[in-house]
Image (cartoon, grey):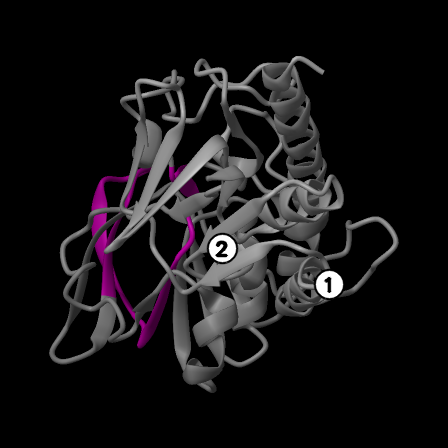
Amino acid sequence: MYDLIIIGGGPAAITAGIYAARKKIKVLLLTKNWGGQMAWAPEIDNYTGISNVKGLDLVNRMVAHLKENDLEIKEGVEVKKVSLKKDSSLEVRTGEEVYQSRTLIMATGRTPKKINAAGEEKFLGKGISYCAVCDAPLYADRVVAVIGGGNTGINTALEAAKYAARVYILGYQPKSSADQYLQIKAESNPKITFYHNILTHEFKGDNFVSAVVYEDKNTGEKKELAATGVFIAIGSIPNSSLVKNMVELNEKKEIKIDCQNASSVKNIFAAGDVTDVSHKQIIVATGEGAKAALNAYNYLNQMKGE
C-alpha cells in the first residue's frame, strides 16, 4: 500500500513527486513518458530563473532533480484504470500490475486536439504531425502548413520556419488570438504567411500529404494549398478519462479542484493542465504540483489523527 500515487510525467507530476518524497511518505509515480506538452516547446522564456531554454532541456533537468529523491518511479507505463474501493483506498491498474494507495494525484496533462478533417487520420505520420519540435526538421526546405492561429499555432510556425522554405498559418478566427509578442515574431519572419478566417476541410495526397483544402470564410470559396508537411496546432483536451466517472468535471472535462487541489473525492487530488485552474503555464503547473503533494500529505496526517 502506497501513501500516494502520482499519475503523470509533466511539470505538475514531477514537482508533486519531489515535494511528496521530501515528506518521507511512500510514493509511486507512474508515467508513460516525460514532459507532457512542455517537451514540445521549442523555446521557454518565461520560467523564472531559467531563460531561453528548450522544452526538452527543461524536462531533462526536472526529471534529473526528481530522481535525486527517494520515491519509486515506473516509466513507460500506461495507467488503464483507477478504482475507488469500499474502504476509500484507491486501486491503480497498468496492464497486469495493480497498485494500492491511500491518496492519488492526477497530473495527466492534456492531449492535442484533432480537427477531424478528411484525411487527418490517413496522413498522420505521413506528412501530418501534432508536434513541431519532434518533426519540423523532417520538412527542411519544404512548404509547410500550420493549422491554428493561437499561441500553439504561432509557436509551431516559428519552430517550423527554422527548417521549412515556407510556412503558411491557417487560422480559424478573423485575426490571431496569440499573445502579441508571438504575433510580432511571426509577422517579422519572412518565411511565414498568415491566412485568417479559414476553415480546413481536407488533406489530400497519395502515400503522403501533398495539399490542404480549405474554405475562405469571408467569401465561401474553397481553395487548395500545396504543402508536403502539416502541423495541427489548435490546442488540447484534458486527459481526465481515468476518473471521469469518479470525480466532478467541468464542461471542458477538466477536473474541478478546490484551493487545496482536492477533487470532489476527498483523497483524489489533481494538478496542472488537467484541472480547471485557468492559466495553463509551466510555472503554474509546477506550483500546483507542489500544492497537491503538500495537501495530500496533510490529508494523510488527518487520516492518522495527527
Residue 202 lies within the magenta run: no
According to the picture, the residue beneath numbered tag 2 turns out to be: 194
Residue 210 position, x and y percent, is 23, 75
**Looking at the image, which residue sits at the far right?**
49
Residue 289 in view: yes
Residue 232 position, x and y percent, is 37, 56
Label 1: state its secondary structure.
loop
According to the picture, the residue beneath numbered tag 1 turns out to be: 68
Over which residues does the magenta segment extend? 212-239
Residue nearest the viewer, comparing 202 with 109: 109
Label 2: state its secondary structure.
strand
Is residue 101 placed above or below 123 in the rendered structure?
above
Residue 221 lies within the magenta run: yes
Describe residue 127's horizontal placement relative to residue 15 as left or right.
Answer: left
Describe residue 263's horizontal placement relative to residue 96 as left or right.
Answer: right
Residue 48 position, x and y percent, is 84, 48
